[in-house]
């Protein structure tokens, strides 16, 4: 199958064929037969020649598939617009997708040509003969082994548990009938609330004759004169 017309604008670079024939013979009893290496060598070369011969067809298949995808996408978009927005919007959409489709095709054609040429050339020279295939395999295995050997090994080291320090504060008992808890350690600051006689609190800090305590989720201050430490 030839795609000469389809790929006329997107030519494949001519890939050389390996026309050499590798022949060596091994003795089998009283006869001589073609050696295993010769058959392997010629088999690899024939695979490479297949890539050289089929490069244009591969480009044609991929180009045809790409063109079909672009056309189908455009048709679906136009039909969807017709259903949702009516005929005239679909007509405008058809005009737009035609322009977009042509641009997409030329961009895709360039990418396809570059990709096919690179891939087919690569496989062609990979399968040039038995030696090129063996060298490529050795290099690949060597690269994989080097990467596996040189990659850092991660030894699991258990993380030491961190102790959480919970401070212990002295407890004080309120001796006043009603004791104001203020926002700052002075007598003129705003009152947050009150403590009742006998109520026990933890004193976080002391400042200017006031005890800093935790009061309804915020820091408050109460006079130390009316707080007795609990032993």
Image (spheres, helix red, strand yellow):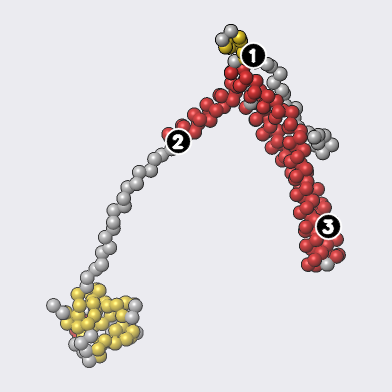
Nearer-N-terminus badge (1/2):
1
Which residue has dot 1 on it? Answer: 23
Which residue has dot 3 on it? Answer: 94
Nearer-N-terminus badge (3/1):
1
The CA span between labels 2 and 3 is: 54 Å
> What is the quadrant of residue 176 in the picture?
bottom left
- Left or right of 148: which side holds 18? right
The CA span between labels 1 and 2 is: 39 Å
Above or below for 91 versus 206 = above
Q: Is residue 103 in view? A: no
In terms of secondary structure, where does tag 3 sit? Answer: helix
Task: Give whichever of 101, 38 is nearer the camera.
Answer: 38
> What is the quadrant of residue 226 in the picture?
bottom left
Tell me residue 83's x, y (percent). Answer: 80, 66
The residue depicted at 24 percent of the width and 68 percent of the height is 167
| Closer to viewer: mark 3 or mark 1 | 1
The CA span between labels 3 and 1 is: 61 Å
């Amino acid at each position: 199958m030839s795609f000469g017309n389809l790929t006329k604008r997107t030519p494949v670079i001519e890939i050389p064929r390996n026309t050499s024939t590798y022949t060596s013979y091994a003795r089998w009893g009283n006869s001589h037969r073609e050696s295993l290496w010769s058959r392997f060598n010629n088999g690899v070369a024939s695979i490479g020649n297949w890539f050289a011969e089929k490069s244009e067809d591969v480009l044609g298949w991929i180009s045809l598939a790409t063109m079909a995808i672009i056309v189908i996408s455009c048709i679906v978009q136009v039909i969807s617009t017709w259903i949702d927005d009516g005929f005239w919007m679909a007509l405008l959409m058809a005009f737009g997708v035609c322009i977009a489709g042509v641009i997409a095709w030329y961009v895709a054609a360039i990418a396809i040509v570059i990709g096919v040429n690179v891939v087919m050339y690569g496989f062609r020279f990979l399968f040039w003969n038995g030696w090129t295939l063996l060298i490529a395999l050795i290099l690949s295995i060597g690269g994989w082994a080097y990467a596996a050997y040189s990659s850092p090994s991660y030894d699991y080291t258990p993380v030491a548990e961190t102790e959480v320090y919970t401070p212990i504060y002295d407890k004080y008992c309120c001796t006043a009938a009603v004791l104001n808890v203020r926002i700052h350690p002075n007598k003129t600051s705003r009152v947050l609330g009150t403590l009742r006689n006998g109520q026990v609190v933890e004193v976080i800090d002391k400042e200017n004759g006031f005890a800093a305590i935790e009061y309804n989720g915020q820091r408050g201050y109460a006079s130390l004169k009316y707080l007795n430490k609990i032993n």
